[in-house]
Image (cartoon, rainbow, N blue to C red):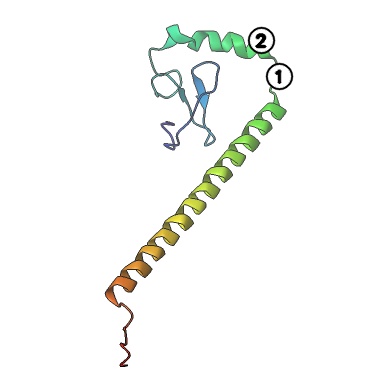
Amino acid sequence: MCPTCKNVVERESGCNHMICRCGGTFCYECGAIWRTCDCEADGHDEDEDEDEDRGAYDEQAENDYWDRLIREEEIVRRREIVRRRAELAWQQQRMNEREAVQDPPEVVEEEG
């Protein structure tokens, strides 16, 4: 969880250095603000070398990341809408059933 904005962040691979969409940076392992924890043995110092090896900033990779994140958030939002609609339909059906039990139709007996 990002210590800056409290958003949940999931690591797919890589080092412990996390960069949230809010701009906050933190250690994935312990959750502390980046470089304020004692997790150096788990890759903090190695991250600087990896950054240099990677070369220039890869704007396309970052754009792809944010596009994927936006798509995933849209899927979650749509699933929640479907779930809410199903729940409302179920509640409406239960109300209709209760009304039917409370107000049974009148039975008229024919004389004959």
Residue at the (45%, 18%) spot, across then down? 35
Q: Nearer the viewer, residue 88 or 41?
A: 88
102 relative to 32, above or below: below
Question: Which label is found at residue 92?
Answer: none
Quarter-of-image position of residue 1 = top left
Q: Residue at x 70, y 24 (%)?
A: 58
**Is residue 36 found left or right of 70 in the rendered image?**
left
Q: Which residue is mark 2?
A: 53
Locate residue 87, reporting x and y percent.
42, 56
The amino acid sitting under disc 2 is: Asp
100 sits left or right of 74 in the view: left
Residue type highlighted by circle 1: Ala
Query: For the residues marked 2 and 1, what is the alpha-carbon distance in whole angstroms?
Result: 9 Å
Q: Please tell me which residue lies in front, 64 or 40.
A: 64
Establish if 111 lies above or below 80: below
Identified at 68% across, 33% down, the residue is 63
Q: Residue at x 48, y 57 (%)?
A: 85
Residue 100's spot in the image, x, y percent? 34, 73
